[in-house]
Image (cartoon, rainbow, N blue to C red):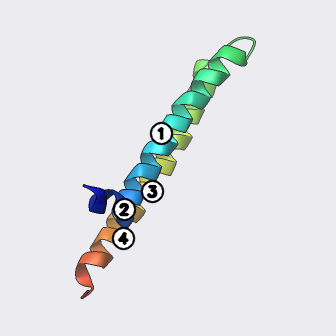
Amino acid sequence: MRDRLTSDLGVYALSGLFSLVVFAFALWILSRTLPGGLASRQLGGLIVGYLLFVGVYTTAWFIYTGIDSREEV
């Protein structure tokens, strides 16, 4: 298990999970501190932006996996 977490892909997975936690925490903070809370348009923009980020991140992860599997170690 430790080998899996300390591998390159494990680091990618853990940093992706960390970004999700930070994003959820930031949404919670914004919903509590903004005077009117988060409007649906603001929330939609933030979520679409985050999903675009996750999409690019996941694509890079799969590309990295493909390159790693084709190289002789």
Residue located farthest toward the bottom when viewing the structure as drawn: 72
Question: Which residue type carries mark 2?
Answer: Thr
Question: Which residue type carries mark 4?
Answer: Tyr
- The crowd level at tag 3 (other Cα within 10 Å; few <14, some 14-19, many 20+) is some
Labels 1, 2: front one: 2
Instruction: Say which label, 3 or 2, has the lower sequence index.
Output: 2
Which percent across, then down, holds residue 32? Answer: 66, 15
Classify mark 3: helix, strand or loop: helix
- Residue ID for mark 2: 6
Left or right? Give the position of 40 relative to 59: right
- The crowd level at tag 2 (other Cα within 10 Å; few <14, some 14-19, many 20+) is few
Instruction: Say which label, 4 or 2, has the lower sequence index.
Output: 2
Labels 3, 2: front one: 2
In the image shown, does 46 or 2 lie closer to the viewer? 2
- Residue ID for mark 4: 64
Q: Residue at the location (71% across, 11% down)?
A: 36
Instruction: Measure how far apart labels 1 and 2 are at the Cα level.
Output: 19 Å
Quadrant in which the N terminus appears: bottom left
Instruction: Measure how far apart labels 4 and 2 are at the Cα level.
Output: 16 Å
- Residue ID for mark 3: 57
Which percent across, then down, holds residue 62? Answer: 32, 64
Q: Residue at the location (55% across, 36% down)?
A: 23
- The crowd level at tag 1 (other Cα within 10 Å; few <14, some 14-19, many 20+) is some
Instruction: Say which label, 1 or 2, has the lower sequence index.
Output: 2
Q: Residue at the location (49% across, 48% down)?
A: 52
Classify mark 2: helix, strand or loop: helix
In the image shown, does 47 or 23 lie closer to the viewer? 23
Disc 4 + disc 1, Cβ < 8 Å = no
Classify mark 4: helix, strand or loop: helix
Question: Which residue type carries mark 1?
Answer: Leu
Residue 20: mark in rendering: 1
Instruction: Say which label, 1 or 3, has the lower sequence index.
Output: 1
